[in-house]
Image: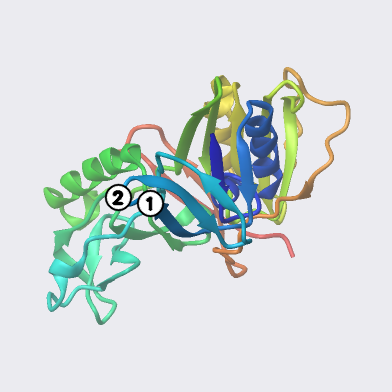
Amino acid sequence: MTVVEAGPAPLVGALGRVIGDIAAGMQRDAGVDLRCGVTVTELVGDEQGRLTGARLSDGGTVEADMAVVALGAVRNVEWLEGSGLAAGPWGVATDAGCRAVDINGLVTDDIFVAGDVARFPHPVYHYQFMSLEHWGNAVAQAEIAAHNMLSDQAHRWPHLSLPVFWSNQFGVNIKSVGVTSIADEVVIAQGSVEERRFVAVYGYKGRITAAVTFDQAMWLDFYRDLIERATPFPPDYRMVGRPDEMRPVPAEVPQRMAPAAGATVVVTGHDPAERRVSLVRQQP
């Protein structure tokens, strides 16, 4: 099998270069012909119209009789043109309670948005607007939207779920919680990279922002709690498989999010009815 990857390594867009390099090694160990930093410029076929291969941007070629193309997704908002809502390629802007924002930046009272198309400010991440493209988020956000449709202002809930992601690759279960693309550092907090059983924790300016596990998913809830409590980075706990010395390194994530200095919050409560945030003042 040949994989052509436009980025420097697999999963870089989701998890950064450090974890991407580990994933690249895992794929190559499994016999994958992984070609990074190149793109497909042309699919080639025979006279009967059957696929025979592909030409690459680096001048190389690949013989193939089947191609799987992964190009991402486009938010279908064209039907909202002329609606007066703040809708575009980024999705539909909302507040944290799933209420749509109009083109003037004002929150509407009776239009609610949930799922991949919703772009809302997340308090845990400096109120940056984000869209969480995962079915689990769509389910959780729909619950918030439905509740708020039936409630007055005093009883509405905020959508505070953290992003989650998972993938199974060559028998290894990869899962993450939180936002990695905001991080400036990452550290292996538990386990062994060589054995492909570890927990990597991401931090931004001294606060834990995300965690990624390779065959260690039982730890995700623990790290989710640390993220919500604005726990200092790197984590300082006596944990199973903790290395003798934690050495954070640059996370090398794509700079899609660059939050300005702002409030840090902690999340309290477990049930949607009691989920709230409180501000924690930054130390000068």
Secondary element under disc 1, as helix, strand or loop, is strand
Kind of residue sitting beneath label 1:
Gly
Count of marks, rendered view? 2
Disc 2 target residue: 49
Inspect this view and state whether residue 165 appears: yes
Quadrant housing the C terminus: bottom right
Residue 30 higher or lower than 37, as above or below? above
| x and y percentages locating residue 240 in the rendered image | 73, 17
Disc 1 target residue: 45
Q: Residue furthest right?
A: 244
Q: Residue furthest front?
A: 47
Q: Quadrant of residue 44?
A: bottom left
Nearer to us in this view, 75 or 86: 75
Q: Quadrant of residue 208?
A: top right
Separation (CA) of disc 1 from disc 2: 5 Å
| x and y percentages locating residue 10 in the rendered image | 59, 44
